[in-house]
Image: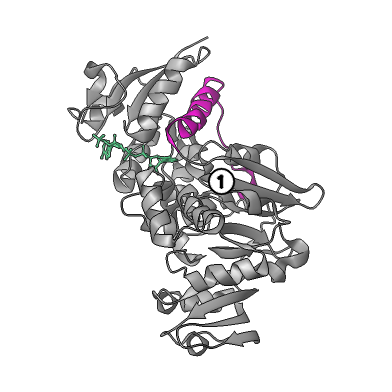
Amino acid sequence: MRKIKIGLFGFGVVGQGIHQVLGRSKNANAEIIGICVRNPDKPRAVAADRSLFTASPDAILDNPEVDLVVEVIDDAAASYDIVRRALLKGIPVVSGNKTMLARHLPELIAIQKENGVALLYDASSCGSIPVIRNLEEYYDNDLLLEVKGILNGSSNYILSRVFDHGADYADALRQAQELGFAESDPSFDIEGYDSLFKLVIITVHALGAYVAPERIFTYGISTIHDSDIRYAREKGVKIKLVAQVVKVSDECFTMFVMPEFVTPDKYIYSVDDEYNGVVIRGECYDRQFMFGKGAGSLPTASSILSDIMARLHDYRYEYKKMNFLQKPDYTTEITLRIYARYSETDVPHILRFDRIYEQYYSDDSNYVIADVSLSELLAKRDRLRSEDVFLANLTRFFQDRDC
Ligand SMILES: NC(=O)c1ccc[n+]([C@@H]2O[C@H](COP(=O)([O-])OP(=O)(O)OC[C@H]3O[C@@H](n4cnc5c(N)ncnc54)[C@H](OP(=O)(O)O)[C@@H]3O)[C@@H](O)[C@H]2O)c1
C-alpha cells in the first residue's frame, strides 16, 4: 500500500498530537515530511526531527513529494491562505480550523469541485466525535430533523463545575484555564463562537445548507449569575450551552446557539465536564446520541488520523445534500420561549415579547419568562450583549420535536 507523505502546518497542541498518534498507529501508512510553524526554533514538548521544521509555507506547498497537507494552525487568516493555495495546486487537505472553515466553506467547496481535490475536516467540529462523516454518509436529508448538542468543552466544563460542584463562575473559569480547557482569552468559547462555527459546518453536512455565522443568533454564558443557577436548581434543570439546527417544517429550518435549561430526561443533561455530546434526530429512527472528547491533543489528532487514512482510499465529501432539488430554507421566523434575567438593561422594553408567562422583580435582579421570535433576538442581539443580561432557551416550544 502506498504511503501518504504529509506536509504539516502547525505543531502546537494538535500538531504534536498528530505526530504522536502517527508514531503509535501500526497501520498508519503515512509520514510527516515537513512541518511549517511560526517559529521553528521554539522548544517543543514532543520531540520531532529538527530538520523537518520550516517557517516557510512555500517549502511545503512547492515540495512535489507532499501529497497531503494537514493544517492545524491557530491563525484563521493564514489557514485560509494555506488551504486555498494547496487546493488550487491540487493538493488534498485535512484541516481542523473551524473559524476558517465556517467563514469560507462555500468558496472552498467550489474550489474542491473545480479542481477535483478533497478537503476533509472532521476534527473541526467535535474533536474526536466523527459527526461530519456520519452526517455526510449515513443520514439522509429528508429524514433528518435536528442536530443538537454541546459542542464546546470549555464552557461545558465551567457549567459543570458550577452546577455539580457548587463552584462560582470565576473560579470555574480559572480552573478551566489552568487545565488548558479554555484559552487565556476565553471569549471564543464562552461567548458561543466556537459552538457557532462548528454548527455552521455541521449544518452543511446535515442539511446541505450553508448559513453565514453573522446570520445566526449566538449568546454565551459569560453573564451567568448566581440567581440564574439558583433558579435552574429550583426547577431541577441544568444550564448548558447548546447549539442546534432544527427543521421546523418541511420547507424551513432554523439554527441558534444559546444557553438552555436542560431537563434530566435529555441525553445532553448528563454530558458533563469537558465532554461533548451530539443528538441526531430523524423521522424514523427517533434519537441517536454521540458522546466523547471534543477537544484535546490526542482525541483531536485521532480524528485527523482518521481523515488522513480516509485519503488512502481517496475519500472525499460529495456534498450530495447541497445538490438536492428540495432543500429547506433558513428561517428565523420561529418563536422561542426564553428566560431573560436583567438588572439595569431594560430587557422588556428592548425585546418585543409575543406573550409573557412570568415576571419577577427585586432590588438587584429581575427576570421574565416569555415567548419571543428568533428574528427579534437576532435584531436586538447587540443591545442584549450586556453584562447584566443573561438569556436561556426553555425547550417548550420544541416540546414534541425536541432532542
Ligand atoms: N486544541 C484542540 O483541542 C483543538 C480541537 C479541535 C480543533 N482545533 C483547531 O486546531 C487548530 C490548532 O489548534 P491548537 O490547539 O493545536 O493550537 P496551538 O497549540 O496554539 O498551536 C498552533 C500552531 O500553529 C502554528 N502557527 C500559527 N500561525 C502560523 C502560521 N501563520 N504559519 C505556520 N504555523 C503557524 C504555531 O506555531 P508556533 O508553535 O511556532 O507558535 C503552533 O505550532 C486550531 O484551528 C483549532 O481551532 C483544536
Q: Residue furthest front?
A: 166
Q: Is residue 240 above or below residue 314?
A: below
Image position of 80 (left or right of 37): right
Q: Which image quarter: residue 140?
A: top right
| Ligand 1 positioned in quadrant | top left
Residue at 30% in and 45% down: 75
Q: Which quarter of the rendered picture does the C terminus lie within?
A: bottom right
As drawn, which residue projects farthest toward the right?
A: 284
Where is 254 relative to 370, above or below? above
The response on whether ligand 1 sits within 8 Å of label 1 is no
Label 1 crowding class (10 Å Cα cut-off): few <14, some 14-19, many 20+? many
Looking at the image, how many numbered discs can be counted on the residues? Answer: 1
* Front residue of this view, candidates 261 and 33: 261
Of residues 359 and 53, the one drawn nearer to the viewer in this rendering: 359
Q: Residue at x 61, y 50 (%)?
A: 208
Q: Position of residue 279 (x, y in %)?
A: 67, 49
Q: Measuring 55% from the left and 32% from the top, which residue is drawn there?
A: 316
In the rendered image, the vertical position of residue 332 relative to residue 250, given as above or below: below
Residue linked to disc 1: 276
Question: Is any part of residue 67 visible from this angle?
Answer: no
| Callout 1: SS | strand
Highlighted magenta segment, given as a residue range: 296-323
